[in-house]
Amino acid sequence: MNAMISGAGSDRGDDHGNDLHDGAPGADWHDLGPRDACFGDSPCLQATVNGVKVGLFLVDDEVYAIDDLCTHGHAMLTDGELDGFEVECPLHGGVFDVRSGKPMCSPVTRPVRTHPVRFYQGGVYVKVEG
Ligand code: FES
């Protein structure tokens, strides 16, 4: 097995930090670089992939990726406050669950998209539909 970075995600069989996929990520996975470089100073990282601003959030040794742009207005969620699995928008205080993209409180009512994330040989990879 290659460098296992995550804990619980490997048991869930999903793509959050899961290093149990067979083989290297395909061309549709975007390499964000080593995990420590991605999240050295902050648990929040913004990346632009396929023209989409994506917010990546490190929680309990797992990485979750959602659209960074709030569905309520023009604000980047990576500029907000991360509290557990919830990120608060810096503009009006709407909250999203980074695991599901689900809006958790007013004024946000529409979810943000989620994107699969995986680790492979110490690197962080995300797949984003344009
Ligand atoms: S812009 Fe995010 S809650 Fe209003």
Image: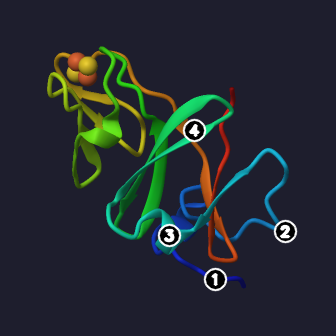
Distance Cα–Cα, label 1 vs label 2: 13 Å
Does the beta carbon at disc 3 come under 8 Å from ligand 1? no
Mark 4 vs mark 1: give the one in front.
4
Q: Residues within 10 Å of mark 1 (few under 14, many from 20)?
A: few
Residue sitting at x 50%, y 29%:
113
Residue sitting at x 36%, y 17%:
110
Distance Cα–Cα, label 4 vs label 2: 25 Å
Residue 97 picture location, percent across and down: 32, 40
Judged left or right of residue 100, residue 34 is right
Judged left or right of residue 114, residue 51 is right
Check disc 2 and give the amino acid type: Gly
Disc sitting over residue 3 in the figure: 1
Disc sitting over residue 37 in the figure: 3
* Comes first in the chain, label 3 or label 1: 1
* Residue receiving disc 2: 23
* Residue receiving disc 4: 48
- Residue 91's image quarter? top left
Check disc 4 and give the amino acid type: Thr
Check disc 3 and give the amino acid type: Ala
Local secondary structure at mark 1:
loop
